[in-house]
Image: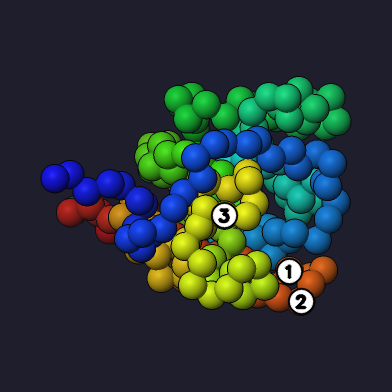
Amino acid sequence: MKTKNNFCIKEGYLSQTKWHHHDDTEHHNDDHQHKVYESARAILDNFNFNRVLDIGCGSGFKLVKYFKDCEFVGLEIEPTLTWLRDKYPEHKWLESDFETKLPSFDIIICSDVVEHLTNPDELMNFINNIDFKFLVISTPERDAIQIYQKGFMWDGPPLNLSHCREWSYEEFNEYVSKFFDVRRQFMIKNKAESKSLCQIVVAKKIMEDGDE
């Protein structure tokens, strides 16, 4: 019998059966995810990079805040895409359809997007088809958020109706490692609540034979 693809999440975990779009434009200047962008900015400065791609950039507030002096592109879906083009017409915003062929980037940011997708493999394959140097990807850490949601052993589906699934620290490392070379993984705190709820993975392309 064929095993169900649960994207490296433990057996018995239940994913969300319905998908609900998350609108980030109403909370564009909150304290969430800033460490993701700060981490990406630190890499950019350390290596003297300049080109940034943000997949699922939401309101674009943090992308503009941390990378306004760089060459960046933000990807989003409608109606957020039109909102971004009206709000920040001086910057480049493209539709996130996982099919558009994109140029090379120094850093790809994907902040709290993967948990919203019914098939996250499509996102990971899309990223893998882009020429990039570093990927900074984040997602809520299931065990951490369950402590104050419904208990440590809760097996889903997520309370957040816009989340299809949520990974533990170890599961997310295993999942990302299927596609990329994980260089670092760490937990970050939500500034507003002082709790470690989110995990960040910094990764690179998997080296093929003959690559330096």
Instruction: Report the residue that reaches farthest toward the left.
Output: 1
Quarter residue 26 falls in: top right
Q: Residues within 10 Å of mark 3 (few under 14, many from 20)?
A: many
Secondary element at tag 2: loop
Question: Sequence-wise, which precedes: disc 1 or disc 3?
Answer: 3
Query: From this viewpoint, is residue 167 visible?
Result: yes
Q: Residues within 10 Å of mark 2 (few under 14, many from 20)?
A: few
Q: Residue at x 30, y 47 (%)?
A: 5
Query: From this viewpoint, is residue 39 visible?
Result: no
Q: CA distance from mark 2 to mark 3?
A: 21 Å
Circles 2 and 1: CB atoms closer than 8 Å: yes
**Pointer 1 residue:** 190
Circles 1 and 3: CB atoms closer than 8 Å: no
Type of amino acid at the residue the image marks with label 2: Ser
**Pointer 3 residue:** 158
Name the quadrant of the C terminus: bottom left
Type of amino acid at the residue the image marks with label 1: Asn
